[in-house]
Image: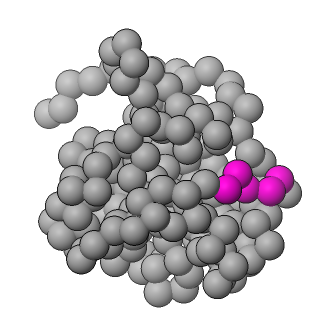
Amino acid sequence: MVDFDVVDLPDVDHPEVGDTVPDFTRPLVDEEFWENVALSDLYADGPVLLVFHPMDGAFPATYIWNEIRDREWQERLEVVGVSVSSPYEHKTLIEERGIDSRLYSDPGAGVAEQFGIDWELDGMEGVREPWPAVFLVDTEGTIRYAWVASEWPDFPEYDEVETAIADHV
């Protein structure tokens, strides 16, 4: 049995439904390679489900991506992840978990900071990562669904995300 404490997270000022999503460019990783890609380039081609998750290898990241894979959301829209993990770690996670999505590498947690959802990891000075969060972005860059964790660990309301996808895709 995994032994961990559940931690309440403070309220944060993150983007909400109706807001324009913050744009960024970072390495976007798939099973073969990575390249710098702007988020706006992705949603210009169709709706995007942006999934912030803990570093690869942490059990919440595995649970989140297993659920997304099993629900086959990537068959209906572009699903991309964001974490502090390196492109090399992302390639391993994609391969090991059978993920059919691409993952942004954000080692400095700058994207999470833009979204207001970065936090100091386990009290380690200078080590930051994003809170689990999900944002559904339409082709104009408007957020149509937003969920941000309120405790650690916490997981998206998958049925709510699925309803939002059905309503906006």
Residue 13 location (% of width, % of height): 73, 32
Nearer to me, 17 or 141: 141
Q: Give the overall secondary structure of the magenta segment.
A: loop
91 part of magenta stretch: no
Q: Is residue 16 above or below residue 98?
A: above
Q: How is the image coloured?
A: one colour
The magenta stretch is 19-23
Q: Is residue 146 above or below residue 167?
A: above
Residue displayed at 74% across by 45% down: 15
Residue 47 location (% of width, % of height): 66, 77
Residue displayed at 21% across by 56% down: 88
Tell me how many marks there are: 0
Q: Is residue 73 above or below residue 145?
A: below
Residue displayed at 37% across by 13% down: 125
Residue displayed at 24% across by 77% down: 32
Asked whether the viewer can see residue 160, the reply is no
Residue 69 location (% of width, % of height): 35, 73
